[in-house]
Image (tube, rainbow, N blue to C red):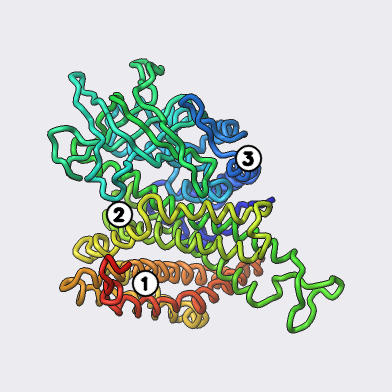
Amino acid sequence: MPHYTAPTKDMAFVLHETLRISELSTRGYADLDADFTSAVLEEAGKLAMDVTAPLNPVGDEQGCTLENGVVRTPDGFKEAFETVAEGGWMGLDMPEEYGGQGMPYIVQTAVGEMFSSANMAFNMYQGLAHGAMSAIVAHGTDAQKQTYLPNMIAGKWGGTMNLTEPHCGTDLGLMRTKAAPQEDGSYKISGQKIWISAGEHDMVDNIVHLVLAKIPGEPDDIKGVSLFIVPKFLVNEDGSLGARNDLSCGGLEKKMGIHGNATCVMNYDGATGYLIGEKNKGMRAMFTMMNEARIGVGLQGYAQGVVAYQNAAAFAQDRLQGRDVTGAKAPEKPADPIIVHPDVRRNLMEQKAFVEGARAFTFWGATMIDQAVREDDAEAEAMISLLTPIIKGFLTDKGFETAVNAQQTLGGSGFTREWGLEQFVRDARITMIYEGTNGVQSLDLVGRKLGLNGGKTVMAFFELVKSFIKDNTEHEALNTHFLTPLKAASKDLQAAGMYFMQNGMKNPNNALSGSYDFMHLFGQVCMGLVWAKMGKAAYAALDAGASDTGFYEAKIATGKYYMARCLPITATHLARIESGADTVMALEAEQF
């Protein structure tokens, strides 16, 4: 039976010693002292460990069922959902005027990691509702906010985002769902959407669907897409629920993983909907949800790596097999625990270095979202826009790889359901696909994000790395083990960008064929940067006489591993990028 332990100590290290959040000028951050965040994280951790984690194998085994148009969730899910809602966790960072707690997004992010590690499928129900709430907060009218937000924040109503149709995924300009205008200002929504997470379930009284559709007579491409609020039950003027809307769940997908989450086919048969945001500006409003969702999916990817690593490390400490080549470490036992073997250590170090670096990277990104939203900081908004496809694409690729590595640590046991690792692998796999496949993320990064503000944003990133290195070179150990490898990796990233500039214009395929490697190269540099920052914080703690020397020494050792064994892969990515498009595009389509 798998287990999960909330990593609150490591989260506190990232928040308060690495990012030093309470010292940042962002509104609301001064209240985030160590005692306050510790209280929040401890309570969330207990909920994750005691309430939702035990339901993870239950949800995987039972899945969801569709009965007479109603989706039944696995045993215990409804009660757990009520517990989460009663604790106010649905609206942690939502506006207080609608019942939220008004905390910064960084707190939501830390709590979200624990909930995702404990039970990813379960957490998706509240995660989709959170995305819908964020879109209503950003683009809804005052009346729409008052109508929907209080009950969604209270966990009485759920929410979804409806984009994909059977014939179109990434190319949303091809969608066929229509929104016919009515005399009362509403619209009749007709069409079918697929792969709608939490599209129908039995844990809430109402579900607020946000649906992309085209208004007849408007441009028949992406420029003619609008966004609509389409509730499962219409809402009366007094806030009570009215008639059932003309929408239904037409089926449930049979999936590789996340069995506990209902992935629905949604049919809209002239359902009443209400325009949110401007007409023909649906993608602008939808991207409020999509960008949040992409960062959330990146978090899901590494969060599955976290719980997988925890179980792998525990197994390696307990499983007896063979003897240490340098001499028996447990002579009183018939064999040594497998953690004595160098290749098992390598595998575990790979996992540990990734999940701890990914946590710091994602938390750093969350602080930029807070800067952008709470301070209207355009530079922070541009930087997180640049990094979003990296957080989503790189962290989910490596998160899945980490889950596989953890499964490998268990040997044959990892292939059986009893130990839980194979579920983590299956659940992690979807993160590389939904909210835009990772190939799409790499194309977004190279094709759109590098050119943000005429290239000023990516140059600002390079300057950020350069400044950190310059400001800390006097620390000999940090410089040797962290800054020197970071400088080399940053040079590889700049060289890749220069290659795109020199060769991408005359043949765009030269850039696009290297986009996936570029996404990983950029991700490695980001991880190198946050590991250097963590290394600095750990050295400072030891120099100040911290009592828990073992924690900080382990942090430094893990960081050294990342810089020495993981970061040099940037040179390989650069070589692949500089090989150009010729080898990628060599075959004619019929030759595949």
Q: Tell me which corner region of the image, top left, top right, bottom left or bottom right, holds residue 314.
A: bottom right
Please, what is the three-letter code of the amino acid marked with disc 2?
Glu
Question: Around disc 3, counting alpha carbons within 10 Å, would you say few (fewer than 14), some (14 to 19), or many (20 or more)?
Answer: many
The residue tagged with tag 2: helix, strand or loop?
A: helix
Whether residue 22 is visible: no
Query: Foreground: 392 or 253?
Result: 253
Mark 1 and mark 3 residues within 8 Å of each other at the beta carbon: no
Residue under circle 2?
Answer: 381
Q: Position of residue 476 (x, y in %)?
A: 50, 83
The nearer-to-camera label among 3 and 2 is: 3
Say what amino acid the circle numbered 3 marks: Val
The residue that mark 1 highlights is 465
Outermost residue, front direction? 590
Q: Nearer the viewer, residue 246 or 529?
A: 246
Q: Residue at x 54, y 71 (%)?
A: 540
**Percent x, y of residue 237:** 33, 16
Left or right placement of residue 60 versus residue 243 in this view: right
As measured in the structure, the alpha-carbon distance from the residue carrying label 1 to the one carrying label 3 is 41 Å
Q: Which residue is mark 3?
A: 51
The amino acid pointed to by label 1 is: Val
- Please tell me which of labels 1 and 3 falls first in the chain: 3
Q: Disc 3 to disc 2, how far (Cα)?
A: 36 Å
- Mark 3 or mark 2: whose residue is earlier in sequence: 3
Q: Position of residue 96 (x, y in %)?
A: 42, 34
For label 1, the SS is helix
Query: Image point 43% across, 40% down: which residue?
Result: 197
Does residue 368 lie above or below 588 as drawn? above
Residue placed furthest toward the right: 332
Residue 514 rendering spot, x and y as whole percentages: 31, 71
Can the viewer see residue 333 in this picture? Answer: yes
Q: Is residue 173 above or below residue 179?
A: below
Left or right, 303 with respect to 298, comes to right
